[in-house]
């Protein structure tokens, strides 16, 4: 097993073993600082509520995205198959994990392609890192798209993870330019995501200007890669372990990042990072997101089969429907216009960050 394959396997095992320890501790998503205004007179029946939503020009049954997690190992094959089968049945989009292992070792390509084989009609999103894109060029992105016949490609930005990973490559010069070139030349739309530290308004503006069509904030408050890498670095690299410890609560909380990215024109915002229930999804959409993405909570169910994945996603949909009913939102468009109140540190954040010229932060 080569380096990347071993690391991918270790990541999944660590995520499973660490459970809640793989999440932020001191920092939350800040969704608890968003209050949706209750509507005692919704003037609609529960079954009239429609959860249909659009992303990157395609219509889906729910505003739910299965976030990119894995590929490149035997377990990853099973995970990607379960996720794809569930996504197909629910008519929602799915993203694979970083395709580097499959691009560099074609024998592993099947562990990603299994998602496409499970469903030819699935809206499938490829995944490579910004660092690899800058280093290898657009041809690398084309290979990622080709491997799974992707409908869109996600570029992940993970500067903190690269910084604290023992074998990390924190070389981010030229990433924005590489994203711009890829958005001009690729045949599918580009999505840019973080992996748990959030995206600011300034970064979202640069990405929108570079031609990126969707931004997945992957904010702080959910899966914490710095903590996961800390577990790995401890025995191998004390210096990196020290850095990981210091920065283990670093990042823009998901709710704040949604407000930041949604203030930028021309990009569709996906809310992710610590999405654990449908009420959080309703709040994310009210703050300006189009979709909500879930990663780690789906990992264990995916190892048990697609039925378990479907059950969890249906619970989220049920909770979202309830929140929509209680705010009098007949559809996702209504929910995006529903009343909310920000409190505590999120209100403070929004006030201090609402000065930018392009800001449309609602206060
Ligand atoms: C096991 C696991 C593997 C992941 N691998 C990738 C990856 O390869 N590429 C990527 O862009 N994000 C990856 N992520 C990050 C997720 O896509 C997501 O942005 C992040 O975990 C926040 O969502 P969550 O709090 O619901 O887990 C991974 C997450 C998990 C839990």
Image (cartoon, rainbow, N blue to C red):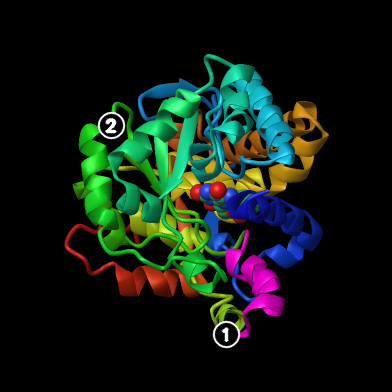
Q: Nearer the viewer, mark 1 or mark 2?
A: 1
Q: Main secondary structure of the magenta part?
A: helix
Question: SS of the residue at dot 1?
Answer: helix
Of labels 1 and 2, earlier in sequence is: 2
Q: Is residue 276 above or below residue 77?
A: below
Disc 1 vs disc 2: Cβ atoms closer than 8 Å? no
Q: Position of residue 56 (x, y in %)?
A: 37, 30
Pointer 2 residue: 186
Pointer 1 residue: 239
Mark 2 nearby-residue class (10 Å; few <14, some 14–19, many ≥20): some
Name the residue rendered at 70%, 42% in the picture: 298
Magenta segment boundaries in residue numbering:
223-239
* Res. 38 in view: no
Q: Is residue 64 above or below residue 166?
A: above
* Residue found at the very far top of the displayed protein: 120
Q: Nearer the viewer, residue 342 or 188?
A: 188
Q: Nearer the viewer, residue 242 or 354?
A: 242
């Amino acid at each position: 097993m080569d380096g990347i394959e071993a690391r991918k396997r270790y990541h999944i095992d660590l995520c499973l073993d660490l459970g809640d320890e793989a999440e932020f501790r001191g920092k939350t998503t800040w969704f608890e600082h968003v209050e949706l205004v209750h509507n005692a007179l919704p003037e609609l029946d529960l079954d009239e509520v429609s959860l249909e939503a659009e992303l990157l020009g395609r219509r889906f049954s729910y505003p739910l995205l299965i976030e990119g997690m894995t590929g490149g190992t035997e377990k990853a094959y099973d995970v990607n198959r379960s996720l794809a089968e569930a996504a197909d049945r629910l008519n929602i989009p799915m993203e694979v994990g970083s395709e580097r292992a499959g691009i560099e070792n074609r024998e592993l390509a099947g562990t990603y392609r299994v998602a496409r084989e499970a469903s030819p009609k699935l809206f499938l999103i490829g995944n490579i890192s910004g660092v690899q894109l800058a280093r290898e060029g657009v041809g690398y992105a084309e290979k990622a798209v080709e491997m799974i016949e992707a409908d869109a490609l996600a570029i992940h930005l993970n500067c903190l993870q690269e910084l604290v990973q023992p074998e990390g490559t924190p070389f981010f010069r030229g990433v924005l330019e590489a994203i711009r070139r890829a958005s001009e030349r690729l045949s599918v739309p580009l999505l840019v995501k973080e992996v748990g530290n959030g995206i600011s308004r300034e970064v979202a503006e640069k990405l929108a200007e570079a031609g990126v069509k969707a931004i997945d904030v992957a904010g702080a408050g959910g899966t914490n890669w710095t903590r996961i890498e800390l577990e790995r670095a401890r025995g191998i690299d004390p210096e990196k372990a020290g850095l990981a410890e210091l920065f283990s609560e670093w990042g823009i909380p998901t709710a704040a990042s949604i407000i930041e990215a949604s203030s930028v024109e021309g990009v569709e915002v996906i809310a992710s990072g610590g999405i654990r229930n449908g009420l959080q999804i309703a709040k994310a959409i009210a703050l300006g997101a189009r979709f909500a993405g879930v990663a780690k909570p789906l990992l264990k169910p995916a190892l048990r089969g697609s039925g378990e994945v479907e059950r969890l996603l249906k619970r989220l949909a049920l909770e979202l429907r309830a929140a929509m009913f209680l705010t009098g939102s007949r559809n996702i468009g209504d929910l995006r216009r529903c009343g909310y109140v920000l409190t505590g540190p999120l209100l403070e954040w929004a006030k201090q960050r609402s000065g930018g010229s392009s800001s449309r932060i609602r206060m």
